């Protein structure tokens, strides 16, 4: 999905060349999220002018475009704010005018980079067109830039010189939808605004001097200064602003939704005028200073800020970061970072902490591997270990999940558990559902987030809703989380990305600690989610004597998983050869699994589809005879999970149904399994042997050959494995 990067230097002299390189490199670190075009905005040569350079394609194409435009790299800036973007098209195809930054006008007075979708952009566009604005792109973002200019101009004309964040508050009142955005403006040189709603945004802080405090105060409007109209007044977008003793609340004027700007969509100025007195009063803030950025003697401190949708692009520069919350308006100027909010909410936090990231730069570098996906597959012995580290006591067979401990009694009392996720994360829920039910004795349902929302599924206060997400930002999962929170359910997050929206919005949870996952096709996050969920299930049953033996077997099984994964990785040469021979140039591939291995079949098929573009389908072996068998002949490639568990006889019979129809499956089986050794000789079937583990953990080992298979199928086809077409790592739109 789209990526945002911004860089502000204050009293740290940088050449334009260095600034552009920092922005471009920031974008390179966001490439993995998936995108189709890029752009940057920096100071131009004229005083307070903005230079925008953008291009479709990869960051490498942007570099060429920068070289073509050839701005003077040697000019130096003591203070400067630059913004940059990778775009994943939602409104308007990838073409140069649609790339971000988007601008308010040909003079680039306000320029914006934006992630997310503005849902009321059509209405805004119509109204701005009626005001005489000319649009050059098909994007929703352009409306925001023009809205900034329009509201700036009308206030300026009426004698109100708004602060940049005051202006932003007015703009945000008008826009609906989701956004993470940065704005810079020639009217506010060396300042930048960063704000978010439903789209991640963080700010890295780098300064030679230690910060005075490791938090930033949140600044609210000074309510004693508020102008309080006695009756509701129509604000710019047809929203009526009411005041009562303590709060300002905003409600939509249903009768006049188009009242935006002028009440009826036609230029008259009357409602503009209506808006101004309220706006000017409402946003009349007291002056404040940001405590974190004060030096001992009160003199300005040199500082650099790195704004990004993702920690991976900031980590090279600093580990000190502040995660913005929804509706925060960060305003950076004069080397200070201020966080504003439009309203004071009861119980809301008064500060945002500046945290220290634990991530290392090496974790987001490819190292000796050709692709991030390959690196991440090979990291699994380590990442699976890290998920368990400090949480499982293998001596005493006990589990300690710090983020869940206090909530376990409440969870045990639940009548049902609903697991909700998308994509690979959904498969990790399917893979662990049975052991969850077995150990907790609570019914578990597994839901695709989008479908769960589409159905408006009933949720009750005594439900436990578990949200599984690698990124912690997936829009469908986040929306489902909000839906369950509104209904009073207890929510649990199983998330990889620390500080992500889902990890912050849930009541409790487990970080899977797999380390940053860059490849679009999720691999190490799957195995770590799987382990985190198993540990969760084990924690739920640690008060049950009847489960003691089973629990011990699973815990001892988990202990061996990292080394067993290492062993499975040794299958790579054989898998590579199969991909180059038997599986090369195939159009379709079926993957059969049953019981615990049905999830492995679905996840394997998803991996193959995602990056090799080959049709692949995970089939429940028990369903074979109800339709899929019709496809089987001597030509159809088929993979079957034939590892040992209580369903083995049934799986065997399904595979025999295939071989009886001249199918030649590749069977993933346990090492030295006599049944398969014999069949390999007699019925022309290939085997891929993996170590045996406890039934509910076998999927952790069985998925690895399919991860490798999807990787090699894609590489053999010359596909850019880390950037499969049309897909994004973090899907932040519905
Ligand atoms: C995208 C990614 C998948 C991922 C899914 C859910 O589709 O390409 O790899 O499984 O989103 O993402 P999440 O971050 O919520 O696990």
Image: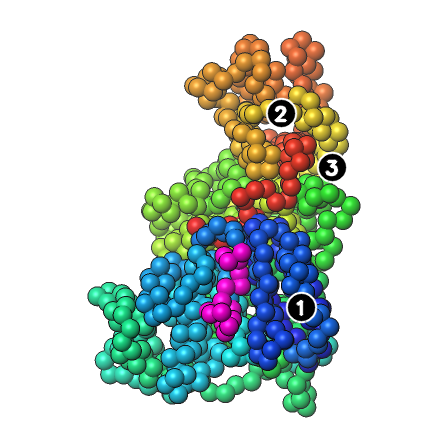
* Furthest residue in direction right, as rendered: 368
Question: Magenta span has 630?
Answer: no
Judge: label 2 CB < 8 Å from ligand 1: no
Name the residue at 27% across, 83% down: 229
Compared to residue 531, the image places residue 109 above or below, namely below
Q: Which residue is mark 1?
A: 71
Instruction: Give percent across and percent down for residue 19.
Output: 68, 69
Q: Give the quarter of the image for residue 267.
A: bottom left
Question: Magenta span has 104?
Answer: yes
Classify 10 Å Cα crowding around label 3: few (below 14), some (14-19), many (20 and above): some
Q: Which residue is mark 3?
A: 566
Instruction: Give percent across and percent down for residue 459.
Output: 36, 49
Disc 1 on helix, strand or loop?
loop
Label 3 vs label 2: CA separation? Answer: 29 Å
Instruction: Give percent across and percent down for residue 370.
Output: 73, 43
Q: Give the quarter of the image for residue 345.
A: bottom left
Compared to residue 409, the image places residue 725 above or below, namely above
How many numbered marks does the figure carry? 3
Q: Are marks 2 and 1 in contact (CB under 8 Å)?
A: no
Compare marks 2 and 1 and give the one earlier in the sequence.
1
**Front one among 23 and 172:** 23
| Pair 2/1: label in front | 1
Q: Give the quarter of the image for residue 307.
A: bottom right
**Front one among 392 and 152:** 152
* Res. 469 in view: yes
Disc 3 on helix, strand or loop?
helix
Disc 2 on helix, strand or loop?
loop
Classify 10 Å Cα crowding around label 1: few (below 14), some (14-19), many (20 and above): some
**Front one among 276 and 222:** 276
Q: Which residue is mark 2?
A: 585
Label 1 vs label 3: CA separation? Answer: 50 Å
Q: Which residues are magenta?
A: 96-111
């Amino acid at each position: 999905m789209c990526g945002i990067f911004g860089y502000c230097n204050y009293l740290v002299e940088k050449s334009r060349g260095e600034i552009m390189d920092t922005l471009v490199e920031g974008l390179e670190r966001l490439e993995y999220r998936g995108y189709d075009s890029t752009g940057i905005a920096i100071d131009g040569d004229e005083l307070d002018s903005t230079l925008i350079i953008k291009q479709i394609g990869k960051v490498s194409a942007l570099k060429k475009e920068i070289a073509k435009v050839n701005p003077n790299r040697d000019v130096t800036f003591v203070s400067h704010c630059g913004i940059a973007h990778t775009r994943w098209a939602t409104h308007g195809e990838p073409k140069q005018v649609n790339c971000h930054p988007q601008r308010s006008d040909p003079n680039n007075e306000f320029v914006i980079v934006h992630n997310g979708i503005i849902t009321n952009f059509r209405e805004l566009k119509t109204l701005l067109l009626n005001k005489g604005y000319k649009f050059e792109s098909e994007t929703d973002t352009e409306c925001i830039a023009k809205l900034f200019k329009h509201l700036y101009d009308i206030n300026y004309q009426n004698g109100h010189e708004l602060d940049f964040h005051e202006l932003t508050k007015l703009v945000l009142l008008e826009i609906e939808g989701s956004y993470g955005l940065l704005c810079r403006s020639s009217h506010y040189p060396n300042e930048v605004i960063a704000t978010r709603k439903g789209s991640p945004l963080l700010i890295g802080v780098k300064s030679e001097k230690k910060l005075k405090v490791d938090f930033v105060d949140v600044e609210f409007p000074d309510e004693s200064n508020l102008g309080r109209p006695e009756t509701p007044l129509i604000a710019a977008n047809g929203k009526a602003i009411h005041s009562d003793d303590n709060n300002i609340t905003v409600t939509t004027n249903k009768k006049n939704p188009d009242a935006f700007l002028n009440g009826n969509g036609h230029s008259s100025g009357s409602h503009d005028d209506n808006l101004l007195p309220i706006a000017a009063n409402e946003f009349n803030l007291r002056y404040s200073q940001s405590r974190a950025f004060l030096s001992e003697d009160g003199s300005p401190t040199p500082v650099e800020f790195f704004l990004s949708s993702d920690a991976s692009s900031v980590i090279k520069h600093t580990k000190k970061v502040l995660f913005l919350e929804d509706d925060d308006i960060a305003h950076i100027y004069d080397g200070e970072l201020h966080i504003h909010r439009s309203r004071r909410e009861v119980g809301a936090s008064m500060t945002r902490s500046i945290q220290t990231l634990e991530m290392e730069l090496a974790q987001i570098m490819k190292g000796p591997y050709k692709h991030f996906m390959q690196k991440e597959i090979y990291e699994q012995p380590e990442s699976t270990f890290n998920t368990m580290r400090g949480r499982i006591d293998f001596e005493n067979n006990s589990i300690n999940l710090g983020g869940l401990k206090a909530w376990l009694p409440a969870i045990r009392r639940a009548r049902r558990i609903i697991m909700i996720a998308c994509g690979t994360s959904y498969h990790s829920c399917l893979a662990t559902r049975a052991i969850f039910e077995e150990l907790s004795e609570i019914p578990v349902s597994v839901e695709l987030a989008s479908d769960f929302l589409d159905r408006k599924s009933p949720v009750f206060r005594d439900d436990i809703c578990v949200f599984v997400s690698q990124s912690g930002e997936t829009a469908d999962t986040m929306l489902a989380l909000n839906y369950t929170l509104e209904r009073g359910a207890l929510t649990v997050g199983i998330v990889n990305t620390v500080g992500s929206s889902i990890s912050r919005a849930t009541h409790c949870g487990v970080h899977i600690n797999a380390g940053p996952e860059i490849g679009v096709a999720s691999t190490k996050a799957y195995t770590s989610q799987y382990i985190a969920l198993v540990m969760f299930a084990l924690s739920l049953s640690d008060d049950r004597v009847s489960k003691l033996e089973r629990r011990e077997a699973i815990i001892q099984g988990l202990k061996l998983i990292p080394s067993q994964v290492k062993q499975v990785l040794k299958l790579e040469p054989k898998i590579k050869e199969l991909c180059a021979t038997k599986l090369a140039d195939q159009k379709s591939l079926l993957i059969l699994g049953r019981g615990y291995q049905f999830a492995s079949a679905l996840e394997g098929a998803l991996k193959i589809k995602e990056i090799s573009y080959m049709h692949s389908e995970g089939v429940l072996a028990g369903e074979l005879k109800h339709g899929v068998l019709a496809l089987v002949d001597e030509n159809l490639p088929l993979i079957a999970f034939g590892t040992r568990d209580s369903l083995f006889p049934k799986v065997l019979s399904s595979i025999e149904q295939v071989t009886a129809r001249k199918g030649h499956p590749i069977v993933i089986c346990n090492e030295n399994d006599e049944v398969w050794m014999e069949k390999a000789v007699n019925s022309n079937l290939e085997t891929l042997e993996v170590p045996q583990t406890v039934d509910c953990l076998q999927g952790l080992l069985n998925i690895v050959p399919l991860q490798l298979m999807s990787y090699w199928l894609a590489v053999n086809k010359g596909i850019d494995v880390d950037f499969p077409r049309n897909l994004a790592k973090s899907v932040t739109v519905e």
